[in-house]
Image (cartoon, rainbow, N blue to C red):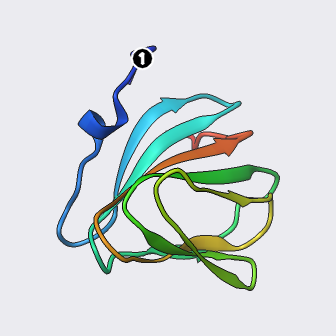
Amino acid sequence: MTERVSNVEELARFTPDKMAKVTLSESPRLLLGLNCLEPGQSQSAHAHAGADKFYYVVSGRALFLVGAAVVEAGPGDVVVCPAGETHGVERAMERTTLLVGIAPFQPKEK
């Protein structure tokens, strides 16, 4: 995506079998994207060494794993995951769109 202004709700994409990802912007300084989940879908627990991450709940509701805690978040909530801390989406409770940012981000070599 190369647009400077984007409407998140128009860009959200959902798939029936697993969480869908939409990249909005990617550089060595920041990855900005959408994670789109149908009810019951999840994102496996993982960590980013040297990079902080946030999930901003645009719509829907989900349970998030952050370290040893499981937290529930809904529209307008932000979930912050410090570098190196295990995190993920344990379960979307309804159709959920998340704005996700990771910084600094090191793109994978293609």
Q: 1 or 56, which lies in front?
A: 56
Residue 17, given in percent of the width and then of the height, sits at 21, 72
> Which of the image's four quarters has the N terminus?
top left
Q: Quadrant of residue 77?
A: bottom right
Q: 91 or 19, which lies in front?
A: 91
Q: Say left or right for 52 vs 46.
A: right
Residue at the spot of label 1: 5
Residue 67, given in percent of the width and then of the height, sits at 75, 78
Q: Say left or right for 57 vs 10.
A: right
Residue 53, given in percent of the width and then of the height, sits at 68, 52
In this rendering, the answer to whether 103 lies above or below 68 is above
In this rendering, the answer to whether 48 lies above or below 45 is above
As helix, strand or loop, the secondary structure at mark 1 comes to loop
Instruction: Tell me which residue sits at (67%, 41%) in the image.
Output: 106
Q: Quadrant of residue 14?
A: bottom left
Q: Label 1 sits on what residue type? A: Val
In this rendering, the answer to whether 108 lies above or below 59 is above
Q: Quadrant of residue 10?
A: top left
